[in-house]
Amino acid sequence: MPDVPFLCHFRHAAAICGDGPYQEIAKSLRRHSRHRVEPAFTTLDHFDGVRFARRATAPALFSVGLMDPVCPPSTVYAAFHHYAGEDRSMTVWPFGDHGGGCGSNPPVQLARLRARPGAGALIALHHRPGQTARGRPARRAAPRTEPRPRDLSGLGEAETA
């Protein structure tokens, strides 16, 4: 599920973003490639999520935070409107930033997956206690050890303070 699609509509995002990764495109073009704007965006178009959305047909649940400075809402909507699949929906978080619904979407996504024929067994298989979503053993935190005392005998008074 795409949730909040990233790297969509590069040209528009670089023009409107004052924050985040799209601003790096604008900075680069301003400093190094002022006369190569069109070739730069032609190259970036090959990686644009909107381009891939036109070919996608799987059911999709998008979400957008209307105050997201990293993935501007207009770029998320560009991917959504170009999405070729008929079974698509958008969850809108009016005051959401890049965190969107702050963890509210995964239960909705899982419910939607469970509703698909045969998906319930697959979800149950991948979400066994003690395992990650990919079926791998969950990592355990390393045991804490006390920090080793530093030898400060060779330092003067000012350096030890």
Image: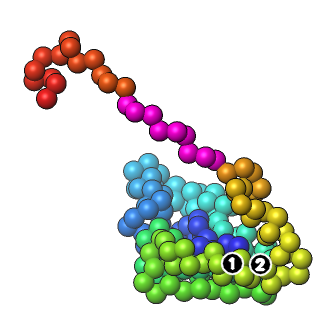
Q: Amino acid type of disc 1?
A: Gln
Mark 2 element type: helix
Q: How many numbered circles does the render carry?
A: 2
Q: Position of residue 156 (x, y in %)?
A: 12, 16
Q: Position of residue 110 (x, y in %)?
A: 71, 77
Direction from residue 156 to residue 93 in the image, left or right: right
Whether residue 132 can be seen here: yes
Q: Which residue is mark 2?
A: 113
Direction from residue 148 to residue 46 in the image, left or right: right
Q: Which residue is mark 1?
A: 109
Identity of the residue drawn at 80% across and 69% down: 124
Identity of the residue drawn at 86% across and 72% down: 121
Identity of the residue drawn at 64% across and 47% down: 139
Q: Is residue 49 above or below residue 26?
A: below
Q: Position of residue 30 (x, y in %)?
A: 40, 56
Identity of the residue drawn at 63% across and 86% down: 90
Assess whether residue 146 is covered by the magenta stretch.
yes
Question: Split into 4 quadrants, where in the image is the C terminus?
Answer: top left
In the image, 152 versus 23, the foreground residue is 152
* Extent of the magenta region: 139-147
Q: Amino acid type of disc 2?
A: Leu
Q: Is residue 84 above or below residue 23?
A: below
Residue 86's mark? none
In the image, 18 versus 68, the foreground residue is 68
Mark 1 element type: helix
Which color mode does the image show? rainbow
